[in-house]
Image: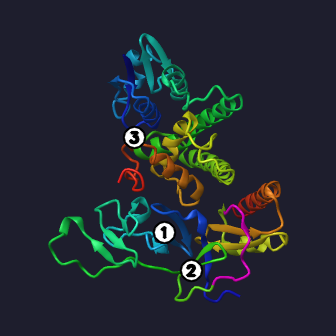
């Protein structure tokens, strides 16, 4: 089904310039950002210097700056500036860059080499909903929902993010679908607690 | 002259300082050592606010307590443009009031968790975090559908109101209370918009720096 374990991690239109978004994938925390080049990057949310969250820093456009000691990383993930050591030679260091691509209005990522987005997953995006239950459990409970096209992204061993698309609803219908999905997912959470 | 009974690390004091600055009001600070001094429990402070809570303002002899009430007072009295608390629009005050009450809920949950983690207050932190997460889920849903309607703010399309000011601090500080903010991407965008309001300065503990895209 999904041998590359490629999952949606963000809605493309919600990843804005000069902004940083967060997500998780299979236990790895992610920072997602759009560079000046227009490309969206998915990196592990950890600065290789002191392991602070990169998402607490700044998207400067062509670089991402860590909040702690101001280390900067270029769009390809390589270290581009150490403010405290401008005169010495920069070490050859890079953040962990995930393989990612944009398809059907979503940002997809994988911890493996080659992203393989689901070509059938497109339409009007539903609100992504967080659920404190493992993806396997959520998937089992969602199999009964046939009116919505859903993908459960495994965030961690205990968390999932549920992405969905539809082409069947107007605004009011979207709200109803959201409510029903929330109700179902809260029941899943109660069941695993 | 307005006097603010203030504590630097209080999110509720911070929201009042924000509005005072945005309204360009001159004020003096009376520092109250909340932690570790616990001065808010001293007789001298209880004489000013018997509830023992910060902030309080003394506006020319008028004593007003409760952060949300102070925001209403300042906006009604000093915001000539009526942007921060637009009472002229019949639908807005009720909506704004709803989020002022919500902000009080954030104080009772997220702020409590933060007092436990950062200042060693004794309370049921798991319960406080759980209530905080419930509120964050409500806020996330509200902001998602607000965005879909073209509304950048809690109650309005273009100009933030005191509802946004009231809810901002403890949402922005939630990770100091041990709450993982990764699940709330819509809230994150609202926080970023808020920090881009001209003249915004973060308080201690707010990791995000001034954002490029406006002042840089």
Q: Which residue is mark 2?
A: A101
Label 2 – label 1 distance at C-alpha: 12 Å
Majority SS type along the magenta span: loop
**Residue B66 coordinates in the image, percent (x, y):** 52, 25
Label 2 residue SS: strand
Q: Nearer the viewer, residue A95 or A86?
A: A86
Which chain does the residue under circle 1 lie in?
A
Q: Is-magenta flag for residue A123? A: yes
Q: Residues within 10 Å of mark 3 (few under 14, many from 20)?
A: few
Q: Quadrant of the N terminus of chain B?
A: top left
Which element type, helix, strand or loop, lies under badge 1?
strand
What residue is disc 1 on? A34
Q: Mark 3: which secondary structure?
A: loop
Q: Is residue B202 above or below residue B207?
A: above
Tell me the residue at 30%/67% (across/down). A71
From the viewer's perspective, tell me whether residue B12 is left or right of residue B129. left
Q: Is residue B26 left or right of residue A81?
A: right
Q: Please tell me whether residue A126 belongs to the stretch shown in magenta.
A: yes
Chain ID, mark 2 = A
Magenta stretch, residue numbers: A117-128
Q: Residue at x 45, y 22 (%)?
A: B56
Q: Residue at (53%, 44%) from the top-left corner? A: B110
Do we see residue B184 in this rendering? no
User: Which residue, as the protein is rendered here, is positioned at the far left?
Assistant: A87
Label 3 sits on residue: B199
- Percent position of residue A39, x then y: 49, 75
Q: Quadrant of residue B42?
A: top left
Q: Considering only order in the chain, which callout, 1 or 2, is on the residue closer to the N terminus? A: 1
């Amino acid at each position: 089904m999904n041998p590359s374990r490629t999952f949606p991690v963000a809605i493309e239109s919600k990843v804005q310039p000069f902004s940083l978004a967060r997500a998780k994938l299979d236990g790895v925390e992610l920072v997602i950002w759009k560079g000046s080049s227009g490309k969206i990057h998915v990196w592990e949310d950890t600065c290789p210097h002191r392991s602070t969250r990169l998402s607490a820093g700044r998207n400067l456009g062509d670089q991402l700056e860590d909040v702690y000691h101001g280390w900067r990383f270029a769009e390809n993930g390589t270290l581009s500036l150490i403010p405290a050591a401008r005169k010495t030679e920069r070490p050859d260091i890079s953040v962990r860059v995930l393989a990612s691509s944009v398809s059907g209005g979503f940002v997809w990522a994988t911890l493996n080499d080659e992203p393989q987005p689901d070509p059938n997953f497109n339409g009007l995006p539903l609100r992504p909903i967080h659920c404190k239950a493992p993806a396997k459990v959520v998937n089992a409970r969602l199999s009964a929902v046939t009116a919505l096209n859903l993908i459960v992204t495994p965030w961690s061993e205990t968390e999932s993010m549920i992405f969905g698309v539809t082409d069947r609803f107007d605004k009011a219908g979207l709200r109803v679908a959201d409510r029903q999905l929330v109700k179902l997912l809260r029941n899943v959470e109660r069941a695993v607690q | 002259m307005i006097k603010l009974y203030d504590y630097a690390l209080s999110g509720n004091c911070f929201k009042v300082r924000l509005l005072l600055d945005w309204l360009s009001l001159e004020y003096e600070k009376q520092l109250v050592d909340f932690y570790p001094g616990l001065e808010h429990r001293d007789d001298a402070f209880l004489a000013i606010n018997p509830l023992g809570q910060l902030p309080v303002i003394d506006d020319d002899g008028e004593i007003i307590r409760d952060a949300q009430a102070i925001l209403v007072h300042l906006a009604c009295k000093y915001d000539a443009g009526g942007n921060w608390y637009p009472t002229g629009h019949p639908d807005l005050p009720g909506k704004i009031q709803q989020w002022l009450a919500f902000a009080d809920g954030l104080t009772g949950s997220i702020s409590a968790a933060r007092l436990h983690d950062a200042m060693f207050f004794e309370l049921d932190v798991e319960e406080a975090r759980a209530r905080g997460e419930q509120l964050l889920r409500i806020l996330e849903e509200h902001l998602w559908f607000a965005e879909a309607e073209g509304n950048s703010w809690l109650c309005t399309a273009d100009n933030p109101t005191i509802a946004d000011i009231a809810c901002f601090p403890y949402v922005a500080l939630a990770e100091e209370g041990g709450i993982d903010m990764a699940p709330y991407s819509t809230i994150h965008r609202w926080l970023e918009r808020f920090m881009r309001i001209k003249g915004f300065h973060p308080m201690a503990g707010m990791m995000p720096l001034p954002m490029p895209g406006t002042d840089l």
